[in-house]
Amino acid sequence: MIPPLIWACIAALAQTACGDYVSTNYQEYNDGALGHRPHLEFHSSSEYAPLLQVNIWDQDAISETGSHIFIKHDGNDSSPLSSPLILDAHDLSAVYMNRTFKNVFGTRVQENFGKKYLTFWEGEKGDGIGDGYGLAYDDTYRLVYKIWAQNIKVHSDLHEFAFTGNGTALVTGVNAINAHASDFLDKGWITPPRFEVLDSIFQEIDLETNEVLFDWRALDHINPMDSYEPMGRGWDAYHMNSIQKVREGHTSPGDL
């Protein structure tokens, strides 16, 4: 005869080891009753997927055209590793994840010459600035392109990795520059004679060769003294977040 305590343990394990599960209990989720970072584990893989909180779950209302959801997952207490994550929009089950990266950003599908790729940034990040690479995977999840900014102190910032669709990608970068106040100020201003400013950069890179085709640097065009960001060590006077290339004669909100 199996003792009652053993039966209780078996019942608890059976409940937590169930398959795809969607939490709709807002209070229970936020109180931590499902764990600090609730997640699902699998018998067939050592990977784990986030357990999402949904306030309203109506499968009849799910769009037929939006088949998948693309997000980044920041890991859980047992692992610091992040993952690009693809979820099935119909039941929020995990379709793809890869936890070999320390940080990821901007998971999405982009096209190059009409072919679709899974793309995202990966690398080190801190205080809103990253040092990493833009990665592109084909429809078999094979890494095809690894792109980064050239001729700066970091590889590529996390804020943008955008395909143009014509064989190139746009990336952002940050370069710490020791600047001279006399280059930017009129006489009479009170400021340190030398200061460090983070120059915001974007480049257009050839996907096949990683060659820089175009290079733009904020410090060459915009006086940092016009920034509203308070001056300090590692002064982030520009902080470029997004770039987009459009055809001549076309405009889009937020274009540079």
Image: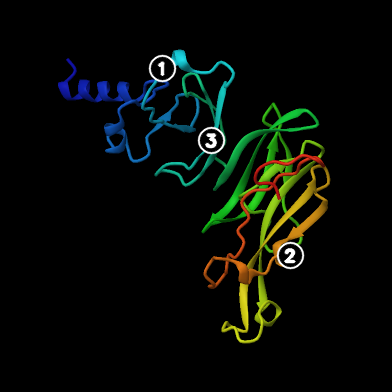
Label 2, label 3: how far apart the Cα atoms are: 35 Å
- The residue pinned by badge 1 equals 58
Residue 73, position in %: x, y? 49, 39
Q: Residue at x 34, y 25 (%)?
A: 24
87 or 54: nearer the viewer: 54
- The residue pinned by badge 3 equals 71
Label 1, label 2: how far apart the Cα atoms are: 51 Å
Above or below, 138 relative to 249: above
Question: Quick check: marks 1 and 2 in contact, CB under 8 Å?
Answer: no
Q: Residue at x 73, y 65 (%)?
A: 221
Above or below, 146 relative to 60: below
Question: Is label 1 or label 2 in front?
Answer: 2
Residue 226 numbered tag: none
Q: Secondary structure at mark 1?
A: loop
- Is residue 101 visible to us here? no
Report the side of 77 relative to 177 (left or right). Answer: left
Q: Amino acid at mark 3?
A: Ile
Question: Is label 1 or label 3 in front?
Answer: 1
- Is residue 166 visible to us here? yes
Above or below, 151 relative to 28: below
Label 1, label 3: how far apart the Cα atoms are: 21 Å
Q: Secondary structure at mark 3?
A: strand
Residue 221 numbered tag: 2
Report the side of 186 relative to 44 (left or right). Answer: right
* Of the image marks 1 and 2, the number of the one nearer the N terminus: 1
Q: Which residue appears farthest toward the top when viewing the image? A: 60
Residue 14, position in %: x, y? 31, 21
- Local packing at callout 3 (Cα closer than 10 Å; few below 14, some 14-19, many 20+) is some
152 or 42: nearer the viewer: 152
